[in-house]
Structures are given as C-alpha cells and as structure tokens.
C-alpha cells in the first residue's frame, strides 16, 4: 500500500457539512484506469476487492473512488438517500443540479480523464457468480477494447445490455453508457455481495483488475471463447417466504421450477415457474419477498467472442 495519494472531489456544502468524495491515486504511467465502488450503497463486496487490489503493483495509474454513494453506504440504501435517486441512472449528471446529479457530474468528469473505466457492483441478497457486463454501443474499436478487458477477467458470464430492448431500457443513464459515447471503453462487474462472495471469486476479480492494467495496451489476443448473454427477469406475483430451488450456472427450460413461496398466513406452497429457457445468472437467496420482487435473472445466449 505504498505511494498511494489520497485526493478529494469537492461536491459542495450540505448545510454545515462540506461533502467531499475521497479517491486514491496509485502509479503515474499509462494506462490510466478508473475503478469505482459503491454507486449503490448496499453493494459492499467492492470494498474487499479494492482493499486487496491496492496491495498489488499497478502497471499504470489507478484512480479509485471506493465509495461513490457515501450516504447510501451509511444508511444501507441502494439509491442516494437524500434525493432518492439511483446514481447509476443519472449520468452524465449536472454540475449545478441536485446532489445525485452533482456527484454524477464529478465522477463523469473524472472518468473522461481516464483510458478506461471499471464499475464494481454486486447483486444484493442474490446468489450469483462473477458477471462482466457492457453496453452495446460505440464503434468496433471501442467494443474490441471492451471485450478484451472482459476476457482478461475470465468471468463466469458475459452480460450484454442492449438499450433498444425494452427489458434493458431501465439501464439508460449508466456511467458505462455515457462514457462509451465519449469513446472511452467501460465495463461493469457484478459479483456476489460481501456475505456471499468466496475467496476464490475475490481473487479472480482482483487478478482480473491487475491484468487489465497490465494488458490494456498490449496487442496479445486471448483465444478462449466466451458466450454473451442477455438477461431476462422473473418477478414475484405474491409475497411470502421465497426458497430457491435452482442455482447460478444451472441450465433450465420454460416452466421449470426455480423456487417456491410460502404464502402467509397459512404457509401454502406455491411453485415459481420459469418463463424462459436459459442459464441462471442470479437468483434470490432465502428471503421474505413482496409483490414485484425480482426473483431471478435468466441468461439467453445472443453471441460469442
């Protein structure tokens, strides 16, 4: 952890409090990469990833914002709690907007000074593997760099977001979408949250980040083939105690049972059937659910790299 500079992004004054987002700078050479954690307040596995990443030598310069959403971390909320907004749907932000927009504006400006961006996320209370994702926009050269970054991580799944698809339109305004439009390659990594992530998974992500910096400007190609998936979602039609019956990486067919719900007050069992065929990307762990809770993401193969 030597030679780490601590700098601050000044957001503005909240009453008597000056809000500054601390960020770390490691190294001086190219490439210059931005790593973000905790855009969503409850997704804390990124903290462990960052803590282990900074113990290693960086081939280039790493700019790291450990906590983009400090009040979300403090109160355990996904969104920025003062404005109630999802930060990762409000890019590029506004310099003179509300708090969420001001945070996004500062992060976007920082991202534009970098050669690439990596946004760390986790599936709260859901079982999953290591998922690398990207938004399908930009020209071929940018996409080539994005897919190379993803291959370096060697994820369990590659998730493509297509903003023209009605199921993916809810991802408009993400940082990776707007920064790719500025011709800067960007990916996001989804992983199990802190209580579920294993040491092996943590090691895989950390080594992947190290290798992105090491290989970003190299012309070497990775020969391993990967499948690209789009995500389809299953939501709850009732409330009760949900118990999963399938797990990540399992292949399922339409009408297969993915779990059951014990409905109150008589604890009647209702089977939850899949609406799609595909592979389980993530599924809710044992939880009390309400109407409309997202239960599972089912991956549909849409291509290969």
Image (cartoon, grey):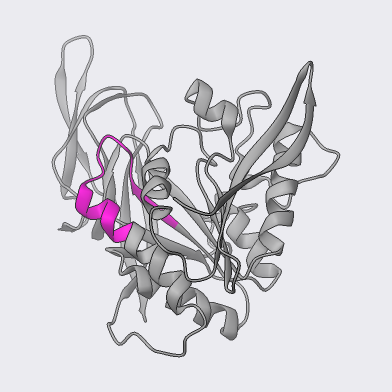
Residue situated furthest top in the rendering:
265
Check the picture and name the quadrant holding the C terminus: bottom left
Residue occupying the point 73% across, 52% down: 92
Task: Judge left or right: residue 3 versus residue 105.
Answer: left
Is residue 204 covered in magenta?
Answer: yes
Q: Which residues are magenta?
A: 189-205
Task: Judge left or right: residue 79 versus residue 194.
Answer: right
Residue occupying the point 64% across, 33% down: 85
Residue occupying the point 68% across, 45% down: 90
Splitting the image into 4 quarters, where does residue 7 fall? Answer: top right
Q: Nearer the viewer, residue 273 or 251?
A: 251
Task: Judge left or right: residue 93 versus residue 268.
Answer: right
Is residue 161 among what the camera can see?
no
**Which percent across, then down, holds residue 173?**
65, 52
**Vertical relation: 267 (above or below) 213:** above
Q: Nearer the viewer, residue 38 or 30?
A: 30
**Vertical relation: 153 (above or below) 235:** below
**Vertical relation: 265 (above or below) 72:** above
**Which percent across, then down, holds residue 198?**
21, 46
Splitting the image into 4 quarters, where does residue 61 fall? Answer: bottom right
Q: Nearer the viewer, residue 142 or 112?
A: 112
**Which percent across, then down, holds residue 175?**
62, 55
Residue occupying the point 44% across, 47% down: 121
């Amino acid at each position: 952890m030597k030679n780490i500079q601590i700098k601050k992004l000044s957001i503005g004054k909240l009453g008597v409090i000056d809000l500054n987002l601390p960020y770390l700078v490691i190294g001086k050479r190219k490439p210059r990469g931005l790593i973000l954690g905790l855009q969503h307040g409850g997704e804390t596995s990124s903290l462990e990833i960052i803590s282990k990443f900074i113990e290693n030598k960086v081939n280039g310069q790493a700019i790291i914002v450990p906590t983009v959403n400090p009040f979300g971390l403090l109160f355990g909320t996904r969104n920025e709690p003062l404005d109630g907004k999802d930060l990762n749907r409000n890019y590029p932000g506004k310099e003179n907007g509300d708090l969420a927009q001001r945070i996004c504006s500062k992060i976007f400006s920082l991202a534009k000074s970098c050669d690439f961006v990596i946004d760390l996320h986790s599936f709260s209370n859901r079982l999953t593997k290591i998922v690398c994702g990207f938004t399908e926009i930009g020209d071929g050269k940018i996409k080539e760099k994005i897919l190379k970054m993803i291959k370096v991580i060697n994820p369990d799944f590659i998730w493509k977001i297509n903003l023209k698809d009605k199921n993916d339109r809810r991802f408009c305004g993400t940082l990776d979408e707007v920064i790719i439009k500025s011709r800067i390659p960007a990916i996001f990594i989804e992983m199990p949250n802190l209580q579920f992530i294993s040491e092996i998974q943590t090691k895989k992500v950390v080594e992947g980040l190290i290798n992105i910096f090491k290989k970003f400007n190299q012309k070497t190609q990775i020969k391993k083939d990967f499948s690209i998936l789009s995500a389809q979602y299953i939501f709850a039609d009732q409330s009760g105690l949900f118990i999963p019956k399938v797990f990540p990486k399992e292949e399922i067919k339409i009408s297969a049972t993915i779990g059951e719900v014990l409905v109150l007050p008589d604890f009647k069992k209702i089977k939850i059937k899949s609406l799609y065929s595909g592979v389980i990307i993530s599924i809710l762990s044992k939880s009390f659910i309400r109407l409309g809770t997202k239960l599972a993401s089912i991956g549909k193969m849409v291509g290969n790299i």
